Amino acid sequence: MRRRGFLATAGALAAPRIGRGASASVLRFIPQSDLTILDPIYTAAYVTRNHGMMVFDTLYGTDRETRVSPQMVAGHTVSDDGRTWNLTLRDGLRWHDGQPVLARDCVASIRRWAARDSFGQTVAGVTDELSAPDDRTIRFRLKRPFPLLPAALGKPGSSICAMMPERLALTDPFKPITEMVGSGPYRFKADERNVGSLSVYERNAAYVPCPSGTASFTAGPKVAHVDRVEWHVIPDVGTAAAAMQSGEMDWWEVPSFDLLPLLRRNADLTVPAPDPMGFLANMRLNHLQPPFNNPDIRRALLGAISQEDYMSAAAADPANWRGGVGVFCPTAPMASDAGMQVLNSPRDLTAVKKAIAAAGYNNERTVVLVPSDLPLLKALGDVGVDLLQRIGMNVDPQYLDWGSTLQRLSKADPVEQGGWSMFHTYWSGLDEYDPAVHTYLRGNGMPAGRGWPTSEKLEALRNDWLSSPDPEERKHIAARMQEQAFIDVPFIPLGQILQPTVFRRNVTDVLTGYALFWNLKKG
Protein backbone atom coordinates (compact mmCIF):
# COMPACT_ATOMS: atom_id res chain seq x y z
CA MET A 1 0.00 0.00 0.00
CA ARG A 2 1.25 3.49 -0.82
CA ARG A 3 0.47 6.69 1.05
CA ARG A 4 1.31 10.39 1.03
CA GLY A 5 3.66 10.72 -2.04
CA PHE A 6 4.32 32.56 33.48
CA LEU A 7 4.20 34.53 33.98
CA ALA A 8 6.41 36.01 31.44
CA THR A 9 3.99 38.90 31.91
CA ALA A 10 1.45 39.42 34.66
CA GLY A 11 -1.41 39.08 32.23
CA ALA A 12 -0.33 35.80 30.67
CA LEU A 13 -2.55 33.67 32.87
CA ALA A 14 -5.47 36.04 32.85
CA ALA A 15 -5.69 36.35 29.07
CA PRO A 16 -8.79 34.76 27.52
CA ARG A 17 -8.32 31.40 25.81
CA ILE A 18 -9.99 31.76 22.46
CA GLY A 19 -11.43 28.58 20.94
CA ARG A 20 -11.51 26.47 24.12
CA GLY A 21 -14.78 25.46 25.68
CA ALA A 22 -15.37 26.53 29.27
CA SER A 23 -15.46 22.90 30.36
CA ALA A 24 -12.05 22.03 28.90
CA SER A 25 -9.55 20.92 31.54
CA VAL A 26 -6.21 22.74 31.61
CA LEU A 27 -3.08 21.76 33.50
CA ARG A 28 -0.53 24.54 34.08
CA PHE A 29 2.97 23.16 34.58
CA ILE A 30 6.30 24.78 35.49
CA PRO A 31 9.07 22.83 33.70
CA GLN A 32 12.64 22.60 34.95
CA SER A 33 13.79 24.96 32.20
CA ASP A 34 12.76 26.52 28.92
CA LEU A 35 12.11 24.17 26.01
CA THR A 36 14.75 25.52 23.62
CA ILE A 37 15.21 22.35 21.51
CA LEU A 38 12.19 20.34 20.37
CA ASP A 39 13.90 17.29 18.88
CA PRO A 40 14.26 14.46 21.47
CA ILE A 41 16.81 12.67 19.27
CA TYR A 42 19.07 15.69 18.81
CA THR A 43 19.50 16.37 22.54
CA ALA A 44 19.38 14.31 25.71
CA ALA A 45 18.08 17.28 27.74
CA TYR A 46 15.33 16.10 30.06
CA VAL A 47 13.02 18.99 29.27
CA THR A 48 13.12 17.89 25.63
CA ARG A 49 12.66 14.22 26.54
CA ASN A 50 9.56 15.08 28.61
CA HIS A 51 8.20 17.09 25.70
CA GLY A 52 9.03 14.22 23.35
CA MET A 53 7.12 11.68 25.43
CA MET A 54 3.97 13.79 25.06
CA VAL A 55 4.22 14.21 21.29
CA PHE A 56 5.84 10.95 20.16
CA ASP A 57 5.23 7.33 21.08
CA THR A 58 7.64 4.42 21.42
CA LEU A 59 7.48 0.85 20.21
CA TYR A 60 7.84 -0.52 23.74
CA GLY A 61 7.25 0.90 27.22
CA THR A 62 9.06 0.38 30.52
CA ASP A 63 7.30 0.16 33.87
CA ARG A 64 8.59 1.18 37.31
CA GLU A 65 10.11 -2.27 37.85
CA THR A 66 12.04 -1.85 34.54
CA ARG A 67 9.88 -4.50 32.86
CA VAL A 68 9.45 -3.93 29.13
CA SER A 69 6.12 -4.42 27.32
CA PRO A 70 4.68 -3.66 23.86
CA GLN A 71 3.45 -0.10 23.31
CA MET A 72 3.07 0.75 19.60
CA VAL A 73 3.66 -2.87 18.67
CA ALA A 74 1.07 -5.59 19.20
CA GLY A 75 3.89 -8.04 19.81
CA HIS A 76 6.92 -9.68 18.23
CA THR A 77 8.24 -13.05 17.17
CA VAL A 78 11.83 -14.26 17.42
CA SER A 79 13.29 -16.96 15.16
CA ASP A 80 16.54 -18.12 13.57
CA ASP A 81 18.12 -18.83 17.00
CA GLY A 82 17.38 -15.32 18.22
CA ARG A 83 18.75 -13.53 15.16
CA THR A 84 15.49 -12.54 13.44
CA TRP A 85 12.89 -10.36 15.12
CA ASN A 86 9.56 -9.43 13.52
CA LEU A 87 7.74 -6.60 15.30
CA THR A 88 4.06 -6.10 14.37
CA LEU A 89 2.51 -2.64 14.72
CA ARG A 90 -0.90 -2.29 16.39
CA ASP A 91 -3.94 -1.44 14.27
CA GLY A 92 -5.25 2.10 14.15
CA LEU A 93 -2.05 4.05 14.79
CA ARG A 94 -1.99 7.45 13.09
CA TRP A 95 0.30 10.43 12.99
CA HIS A 96 -0.99 13.78 14.14
CA ASP A 97 -1.42 14.80 10.49
CA GLY A 98 -3.94 11.96 10.04
CA GLN A 99 -1.69 9.64 8.03
CA PRO A 100 -1.32 6.00 9.14
CA VAL A 101 1.80 4.89 11.00
CA LEU A 102 3.70 2.52 8.73
CA ALA A 103 6.59 0.19 9.40
CA ARG A 104 8.89 2.15 7.11
CA ASP A 105 8.30 5.25 9.26
CA CYS A 106 9.47 3.26 12.26
CA VAL A 107 12.50 1.84 10.44
CA ALA A 108 13.65 5.36 9.55
CA SER A 109 12.97 6.53 13.11
CA ILE A 110 15.02 3.71 14.63
CA ARG A 111 17.93 4.51 12.33
CA ARG A 112 17.82 8.21 13.24
CA TRP A 113 17.77 7.40 16.96
CA ALA A 114 20.55 4.81 16.62
CA ALA A 115 22.86 7.41 15.10
CA ARG A 116 22.79 9.48 18.32
CA ASP A 117 21.90 7.27 21.28
CA SER A 118 24.45 5.09 23.08
CA PHE A 119 22.12 2.08 23.37
CA GLY A 120 20.95 2.74 19.81
CA GLN A 121 24.53 2.56 18.57
CA THR A 122 24.77 -0.86 20.20
CA VAL A 123 21.60 -1.99 18.41
CA ALA A 124 22.98 -0.73 15.10
CA GLY A 125 26.23 -2.59 15.74
CA VAL A 126 24.51 -5.97 16.12
CA THR A 127 22.07 -5.44 13.22
CA ASP A 128 22.78 -6.85 9.77
CA GLU A 129 19.52 -5.61 8.25
CA LEU A 130 16.62 -3.45 9.41
CA SER A 131 13.67 -3.45 7.02
CA ALA A 132 9.91 -3.11 6.59
CA PRO A 133 8.71 -6.12 4.56
CA ASP A 134 5.14 -4.79 4.76
CA ASP A 135 3.25 -1.86 6.26
CA ARG A 136 2.92 -3.38 9.72
CA THR A 137 6.11 -5.41 10.11
CA ILE A 138 9.49 -4.14 11.33
CA ARG A 139 12.19 -6.76 10.80
CA PHE A 140 15.60 -6.98 12.46
CA ARG A 141 18.13 -9.47 11.12
CA LEU A 142 20.86 -9.57 13.76
CA LYS A 143 24.49 -10.68 13.67
CA ARG A 144 23.98 -12.50 16.96
CA PRO A 145 21.17 -12.95 19.48
CA PHE A 146 20.38 -9.73 21.30
CA PRO A 147 17.60 -10.24 23.87
CA LEU A 148 17.87 -6.60 25.03
CA LEU A 149 16.31 -5.32 21.78
CA PRO A 150 12.89 -4.43 23.31
CA ALA A 151 14.63 -2.75 26.26
CA ALA A 152 16.63 -0.61 23.85
CA LEU A 153 13.64 0.38 21.72
CA GLY A 154 11.58 1.10 24.85
CA LYS A 155 14.21 2.83 26.97
CA PRO A 156 12.53 5.63 28.92
CA GLY A 157 15.72 7.59 29.48
CA SER A 158 17.35 10.00 27.08
CA SER A 159 17.36 9.63 24.20
CA ILE A 160 14.01 7.94 23.73
CA CYS A 161 13.49 5.98 20.52
CA ALA A 162 10.75 8.33 19.30
CA MET A 163 8.70 7.23 16.31
CA MET A 164 8.06 9.91 13.70
CA PRO A 165 6.95 10.04 10.05
CA GLU A 166 9.54 8.87 7.55
CA ARG A 167 9.92 12.34 6.02
CA LEU A 168 11.09 13.68 9.39
CA ALA A 169 13.05 10.60 10.41
CA LEU A 170 15.13 10.75 7.21
CA THR A 171 16.53 14.15 8.19
CA ASP A 172 20.07 14.52 9.53
CA PRO A 173 20.08 13.33 13.17
CA PHE A 174 22.79 15.88 13.90
CA LYS A 175 20.47 18.72 12.95
CA PRO A 176 17.35 19.28 15.08
CA ILE A 177 13.91 18.98 13.56
CA THR A 178 11.37 21.65 14.47
CA GLU A 179 8.21 20.18 12.95
CA MET A 180 6.51 18.16 15.67
CA VAL A 181 4.41 15.41 14.10
CA GLY A 182 4.18 12.33 16.27
CA SER A 183 1.55 9.77 17.19
CA GLY A 184 1.56 10.36 20.94
CA PRO A 185 -1.27 11.29 23.31
CA TYR A 186 -0.70 15.05 22.92
CA ARG A 187 -0.20 17.39 19.98
CA PHE A 188 2.30 20.23 20.16
CA LYS A 189 0.74 23.65 19.48
CA ALA A 190 3.50 25.33 17.51
CA ASP A 191 1.29 28.35 16.89
CA GLU A 192 1.16 29.08 20.62
CA ARG A 193 4.81 28.54 21.42
CA ASN A 194 6.58 31.52 22.96
CA VAL A 195 10.25 30.69 23.47
CA GLY A 196 11.30 31.56 26.99
CA SER A 197 7.73 31.72 28.22
CA LEU A 198 5.17 29.17 27.02
CA SER A 199 4.71 25.79 25.31
CA VAL A 200 1.24 24.31 24.77
CA TYR A 201 -0.08 20.81 24.12
CA GLU A 202 -3.60 19.65 23.37
CA ARG A 203 -5.03 16.17 23.82
CA ASN A 204 -4.83 13.99 20.72
CA ALA A 205 -8.43 12.80 20.40
CA ALA A 206 -7.39 10.27 17.73
CA TYR A 207 -4.82 8.55 19.95
CA VAL A 208 -5.39 4.82 20.43
CA PRO A 209 -3.95 3.74 23.81
CA CYS A 210 -2.31 0.38 24.33
CA PRO A 211 -5.30 -1.96 24.90
CA SER A 212 -3.92 -3.91 27.86
CA GLY A 213 -1.85 -3.59 30.96
CA THR A 214 -1.72 -1.00 33.73
CA ALA A 215 -0.27 2.47 33.32
CA SER A 216 3.15 2.47 34.97
CA PHE A 217 5.91 4.87 33.96
CA THR A 218 6.06 4.67 30.13
CA ALA A 219 4.28 1.30 29.89
CA GLY A 220 0.59 0.45 29.65
CA PRO A 221 -2.33 2.55 28.34
CA LYS A 222 -1.55 6.23 27.82
CA VAL A 223 -4.94 7.82 28.51
CA ALA A 224 -4.95 11.62 28.39
CA HIS A 225 -7.62 13.00 30.74
CA VAL A 226 -6.53 16.65 30.52
CA ASP A 227 -7.52 18.53 27.36
CA ARG A 228 -4.73 21.06 27.41
CA VAL A 229 -1.31 21.24 29.07
CA GLU A 230 0.51 24.56 29.31
CA TRP A 231 4.20 24.74 30.20
CA HIS A 232 4.95 28.13 31.80
CA VAL A 233 8.62 29.01 32.16
CA ILE A 234 9.16 30.75 35.51
CA PRO A 235 12.90 31.04 36.24
CA ASP A 236 12.44 32.88 39.55
CA VAL A 237 11.81 30.28 42.25
CA GLY A 238 9.99 32.73 44.51
CA THR A 239 7.54 33.57 41.75
CA ALA A 240 7.06 29.88 40.98
CA ALA A 241 6.36 29.07 44.63
CA ALA A 242 3.85 31.91 44.89
CA ALA A 243 2.08 30.70 41.74
CA MET A 244 1.79 27.20 43.20
CA GLN A 245 0.43 28.46 46.50
CA SER A 246 -2.15 30.74 44.86
CA GLY A 247 -3.36 28.05 42.48
CA GLU A 248 -2.22 29.87 39.33
CA MET A 249 -0.03 26.85 38.61
CA ASP A 250 -0.84 23.17 39.10
CA TRP A 251 2.52 21.40 39.02
CA TRP A 252 6.10 22.55 39.63
CA GLU A 253 8.48 19.95 38.28
CA VAL A 254 11.65 20.84 40.22
CA PRO A 255 10.92 23.00 43.27
CA SER A 256 13.80 24.72 45.02
CA PHE A 257 15.05 22.77 48.04
CA ASP A 258 15.04 25.79 50.32
CA LEU A 259 11.35 26.38 49.62
CA LEU A 260 10.23 22.82 50.37
CA PRO A 261 9.32 23.52 54.03
CA LEU A 262 7.06 26.37 52.89
CA LEU A 263 5.43 24.25 50.20
CA ARG A 264 4.88 21.31 52.55
CA ARG A 265 3.01 23.55 54.99
CA ASN A 266 0.43 24.44 52.35
CA ALA A 267 -2.57 22.12 52.72
CA ASP A 268 -3.46 22.57 49.04
CA LEU A 269 -0.15 21.16 47.81
CA THR A 270 1.24 17.63 47.59
CA VAL A 271 4.98 17.02 47.86
CA PRO A 272 5.36 13.28 47.27
CA ALA A 273 8.43 11.31 48.28
CA PRO A 274 11.16 11.67 45.67
CA ASP A 275 11.96 8.94 43.19
CA PRO A 276 14.51 6.67 44.94
CA MET A 277 16.56 6.51 41.73
CA GLY A 278 17.04 10.25 42.06
CA PHE A 279 19.46 12.23 39.94
CA LEU A 280 23.18 11.52 39.78
CA ALA A 281 25.34 14.63 39.62
CA ASN A 282 28.41 14.46 37.40
CA MET A 283 31.45 16.47 36.38
CA ARG A 284 32.08 15.94 32.67
CA LEU A 285 35.54 16.63 31.27
CA ASN A 286 36.56 17.45 27.70
CA HIS A 287 39.00 14.72 26.62
CA LEU A 288 39.87 16.44 23.34
CA GLN A 289 41.30 19.70 24.64
CA PRO A 290 43.80 20.80 27.32
CA PRO A 291 44.00 20.47 30.20
CA PHE A 292 41.78 17.40 30.56
CA ASN A 293 43.07 15.63 27.48
CA ASN A 294 45.87 14.68 29.89
CA PRO A 295 44.78 11.50 31.76
CA ASP A 296 47.18 12.21 34.64
CA ILE A 297 45.48 15.55 35.29
CA ARG A 298 42.06 13.88 35.17
CA ARG A 299 43.17 11.25 37.68
CA ALA A 300 44.78 13.86 39.96
CA LEU A 301 41.50 15.78 40.02
CA LEU A 302 39.74 12.79 41.61
CA GLY A 303 41.64 13.45 44.82
CA ALA A 304 40.07 16.89 45.17
CA ILE A 305 36.43 15.88 44.80
CA SER A 306 34.24 16.06 47.89
CA GLN A 307 30.77 14.73 47.11
CA GLU A 308 29.59 16.20 50.42
CA ASP A 309 30.62 19.71 49.32
CA TYR A 310 28.81 19.36 46.02
CA MET A 311 25.66 17.85 47.49
CA SER A 312 25.42 20.33 50.37
CA ALA A 313 25.55 23.21 47.90
CA ALA A 314 23.04 21.66 45.51
CA ALA A 315 20.53 20.02 47.83
CA ALA A 316 21.15 21.50 51.32
CA ASP A 317 19.58 19.12 53.87
CA PRO A 318 21.33 15.70 53.95
CA ALA A 319 17.87 14.14 53.65
CA ASN A 320 17.86 15.38 50.06
CA TRP A 321 21.07 13.70 48.92
CA ARG A 322 23.41 10.73 49.22
CA GLY A 323 27.21 10.66 49.07
CA GLY A 324 29.62 7.80 48.49
CA VAL A 325 28.14 7.29 45.04
CA GLY A 326 29.98 5.51 42.24
CA VAL A 327 29.33 5.41 38.53
CA PHE A 328 26.01 3.53 38.77
CA CYS A 329 22.72 4.45 40.44
CA PRO A 330 23.07 3.39 44.11
CA THR A 331 19.75 1.52 44.06
CA ALA A 332 20.63 -0.43 40.89
CA PRO A 333 21.97 -4.01 40.88
CA MET A 334 25.21 -2.89 39.22
CA ALA A 335 26.23 -0.49 42.02
CA SER A 336 29.33 -1.49 44.02
CA ASP A 337 32.18 -0.06 46.10
CA ALA A 338 34.85 -1.13 43.58
CA GLY A 339 37.60 1.48 43.39
CA MET A 340 35.67 3.92 45.58
CA GLN A 341 38.70 4.71 47.73
CA VAL A 342 39.67 7.37 45.18
CA LEU A 343 36.57 9.34 46.20
CA ASN A 344 36.11 8.25 49.81
CA SER A 345 39.65 8.68 51.13
CA PRO A 346 40.62 11.93 52.97
CA ARG A 347 40.89 14.97 50.67
CA ASP A 348 44.23 16.78 50.36
CA LEU A 349 44.04 19.79 48.02
CA THR A 350 47.71 20.64 48.52
CA ALA A 351 48.70 17.19 47.31
CA VAL A 352 46.29 17.47 44.39
CA LYS A 353 47.79 20.82 43.39
CA LYS A 354 51.26 19.27 43.35
CA ALA A 355 50.02 16.22 41.40
CA ILE A 356 48.42 18.41 38.73
CA ALA A 357 51.64 20.41 38.34
CA ALA A 358 53.67 17.19 38.13
CA ALA A 359 51.27 15.90 35.46
CA GLY A 360 52.30 18.79 33.21
CA TYR A 361 49.60 21.39 33.74
CA ASN A 362 50.87 24.56 32.06
CA ASN A 363 48.32 27.11 33.28
CA GLU A 364 46.01 26.38 30.33
CA ARG A 365 42.75 28.33 30.49
CA THR A 366 40.06 26.03 31.84
CA VAL A 367 36.60 27.06 30.65
CA VAL A 368 33.81 25.88 32.94
CA LEU A 369 30.30 26.29 31.55
CA VAL A 370 27.78 27.13 34.29
CA PRO A 371 24.04 27.35 33.50
CA SER A 372 22.83 30.47 35.34
CA ASP A 373 19.10 29.76 35.01
CA LEU A 374 19.04 26.28 36.62
CA PRO A 375 19.70 26.67 40.36
CA LEU A 376 20.85 23.10 40.88
CA LEU A 377 23.33 23.14 38.00
CA LYS A 378 24.53 26.60 38.97
CA ALA A 379 25.23 25.36 42.50
CA LEU A 380 27.25 22.43 41.14
CA GLY A 381 29.11 24.72 38.76
CA ASP A 382 29.96 27.24 41.47
CA VAL A 383 31.49 24.50 43.63
CA GLY A 384 33.51 23.24 40.67
CA VAL A 385 34.83 26.69 39.80
CA ASP A 386 35.90 27.29 43.40
CA LEU A 387 37.54 23.86 43.59
CA LEU A 388 39.63 24.40 40.45
CA GLN A 389 40.74 27.80 41.72
CA ARG A 390 41.81 26.25 45.05
CA ILE A 391 44.01 23.67 43.30
CA GLY A 392 45.74 26.33 41.22
CA MET A 393 44.07 26.04 37.84
CA ASN A 394 43.47 29.00 35.53
CA VAL A 395 39.68 28.99 35.62
CA ASP A 396 37.42 30.88 33.26
CA PRO A 397 33.81 30.41 34.44
CA GLN A 398 31.26 31.27 31.77
CA TYR A 399 27.69 31.75 32.98
CA LEU A 400 25.05 31.09 30.31
CA ASP A 401 21.40 30.17 30.15
CA TRP A 402 20.71 26.45 29.69
CA GLY A 403 19.82 26.74 26.02
CA SER A 404 23.09 28.55 25.24
CA THR A 405 24.98 26.02 27.34
CA LEU A 406 23.61 23.15 25.25
CA GLN A 407 24.71 24.90 22.07
CA ARG A 408 28.22 25.48 23.42
CA LEU A 409 28.57 21.90 24.59
CA SER A 410 28.31 20.65 21.02
CA LYS A 411 31.57 22.44 20.15
CA ALA A 412 34.67 20.24 20.23
CA ASP A 413 36.94 23.20 19.39
CA PRO A 414 39.71 24.64 21.59
CA VAL A 415 38.58 27.15 24.20
CA GLU A 416 40.07 29.96 22.10
CA GLN A 417 37.50 29.07 19.43
CA GLY A 418 34.48 28.84 21.70
CA GLY A 419 35.08 25.38 23.15
CA TRP A 420 34.94 24.29 26.77
CA SER A 421 36.87 22.26 29.35
CA MET A 422 34.35 21.15 31.97
CA PHE A 423 30.69 21.32 32.89
CA HIS A 424 28.47 19.86 35.59
CA THR A 425 25.21 18.12 34.97
CA TYR A 426 23.01 15.37 36.32
CA TRP A 427 21.37 12.28 34.90
CA SER A 428 18.39 10.38 36.20
CA GLY A 429 19.38 7.24 38.07
CA LEU A 430 17.49 5.48 35.32
CA ASP A 431 20.06 6.73 32.80
CA GLU A 432 22.98 5.43 34.87
CA TYR A 433 21.28 2.19 35.86
CA ASP A 434 23.57 -0.20 33.97
CA PRO A 435 26.23 -0.22 31.22
CA ALA A 436 23.63 -0.56 28.45
CA VAL A 437 22.11 2.88 29.06
CA HIS A 438 25.00 4.71 30.77
CA THR A 439 26.10 7.25 28.17
CA TYR A 440 28.91 8.67 30.29
CA LEU A 441 30.59 5.24 30.52
CA ARG A 442 31.10 5.07 26.78
CA GLY A 443 34.68 5.26 25.53
CA ASN A 444 34.04 5.31 21.79
CA GLY A 445 35.37 8.79 21.03
CA MET A 446 33.23 11.20 19.05
CA PRO A 447 30.06 9.02 19.17
CA ALA A 448 30.33 9.13 22.98
CA GLY A 449 29.01 12.66 22.87
CA ARG A 450 30.14 15.87 24.54
CA GLY A 451 33.37 15.13 26.36
CA TRP A 452 34.32 12.59 23.69
CA PRO A 453 36.36 10.11 25.79
CA THR A 454 38.18 7.19 24.23
CA SER A 455 38.79 3.99 26.19
CA GLU A 456 39.18 0.63 24.48
CA LYS A 457 39.05 -1.11 27.87
CA LEU A 458 35.73 0.46 28.84
CA GLU A 459 34.24 -0.44 25.48
CA ALA A 460 35.50 -4.04 25.71
CA LEU A 461 34.04 -4.42 29.21
CA ARG A 462 30.73 -2.97 28.06
CA ASN A 463 30.59 -5.49 25.22
CA ASP A 464 31.35 -8.29 27.69
CA TRP A 465 28.51 -7.07 29.92
CA LEU A 466 26.05 -6.93 27.04
CA SER A 467 27.02 -10.42 25.90
CA SER A 468 26.86 -12.10 29.30
CA PRO A 469 23.67 -14.00 30.18
CA ASP A 470 24.73 -14.46 33.82
CA PRO A 471 23.50 -11.76 36.28
CA GLU A 472 26.35 -12.40 38.73
CA GLU A 473 28.94 -12.17 35.99
CA ARG A 474 27.37 -8.90 34.86
CA LYS A 475 27.78 -7.50 38.38
CA HIS A 476 31.45 -8.49 38.33
CA ILE A 477 31.97 -6.84 34.94
CA ALA A 478 30.18 -3.68 36.11
CA ALA A 479 32.53 -3.48 39.10
CA ARG A 480 35.51 -3.72 36.75
CA MET A 481 33.99 -0.96 34.62
CA GLN A 482 33.78 1.28 37.68
CA GLU A 483 37.43 0.64 38.46
CA GLN A 484 38.38 1.38 34.86
CA ALA A 485 36.31 4.57 34.92
CA PHE A 486 38.48 5.84 37.77
CA ILE A 487 41.52 5.24 35.55
CA ASP A 488 40.22 6.79 32.33
CA VAL A 489 37.95 9.33 34.10
CA PRO A 490 35.32 9.93 31.40
CA PHE A 491 33.39 11.74 34.16
CA ILE A 492 33.46 12.14 37.92
CA PRO A 493 30.41 11.15 40.04
CA LEU A 494 29.42 13.85 42.53
CA GLY A 495 26.58 12.23 44.50
CA GLN A 496 22.87 11.45 44.28
CA ILE A 497 20.19 14.14 44.55
CA LEU A 498 16.75 13.09 45.76
CA GLN A 499 14.69 15.75 44.01
CA PRO A 500 10.99 16.03 44.91
CA THR A 501 8.24 17.54 42.80
CA VAL A 502 5.09 19.38 43.91
CA PHE A 503 1.55 19.61 42.56
CA ARG A 504 -1.87 20.84 43.68
CA ARG A 505 -3.98 18.34 45.64
CA ASN A 506 -6.65 18.39 42.94
CA VAL A 507 -4.08 16.85 40.56
CA THR A 508 -4.24 13.10 41.12
CA ASP A 509 -2.99 9.81 39.68
CA VAL A 510 0.36 11.30 38.67
CA LEU A 511 2.70 8.59 37.37
CA THR A 512 6.14 8.37 38.95
CA GLY A 513 9.46 8.36 37.11
CA TYR A 514 9.52 11.84 35.57
CA ALA A 515 7.01 14.39 34.31
CA LEU A 516 4.40 12.36 32.41
CA PHE A 517 1.03 13.85 31.48
CA TRP A 518 -1.18 10.90 30.65
CA ASN A 519 -3.11 9.02 33.36
CA LEU A 520 -3.22 12.08 35.66
CA LYS A 521 -6.49 13.86 36.40
CA LYS A 522 -7.27 17.39 37.49
CA GLY A 523 -10.35 17.75 39.71
Image: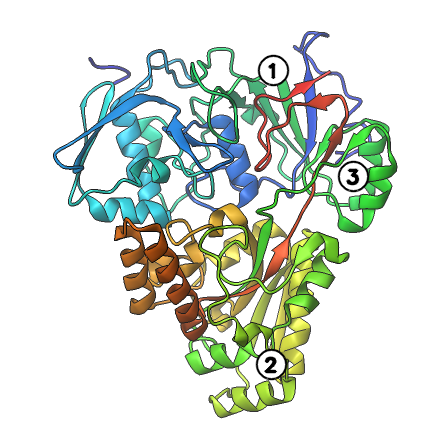
Sort mark 2 into few (<14), some (14-19) or many (20+) by Cα contacts within 10 Å: some
Identify the residue shown where x is 23% and y is 49%.
Answer: 125
Element carrying mark 3: helix
Q: Is residue 79 left or right of residue 329?
A: left
Q: Quadrant of the N terminus?
A: top left
Identify the residue shown where x is 14% and y is 37%.
Answer: 81
First of labels 3, 2 by sequence position: 3
Q: Between residues 57 and 126, which one lies in front from this camera angle?
A: 126
* Cβ–Cβ under 8 Å for marks 3 and 2: no
Looking at numbered disc 3 in the image, what kind of residue is underneath it? Answer: Ala
Q: Between residues 112 and 167, which one lies in front from this camera angle?
A: 112
The mark found on residue 225 in the picture is: 1
For label 2, the residue is: 394
For label 3, the residue is: 240
The answer to whether residue 503 is seen in the rendering is yes
User: How far, Cα to Cα, is label 1 from label 3?
Assistant: 25 Å
Coordinates of residue 287 in the picture (x, y in percent): 42, 70
Coordinates of residue 324 in the picture (x, y in percent): 60, 65
Sort mark 1 into few (<14), some (14-19) or many (20+) by Cα contacts within 10 Å: some
Q: Is residue 152 left or right of residue 363?
A: left
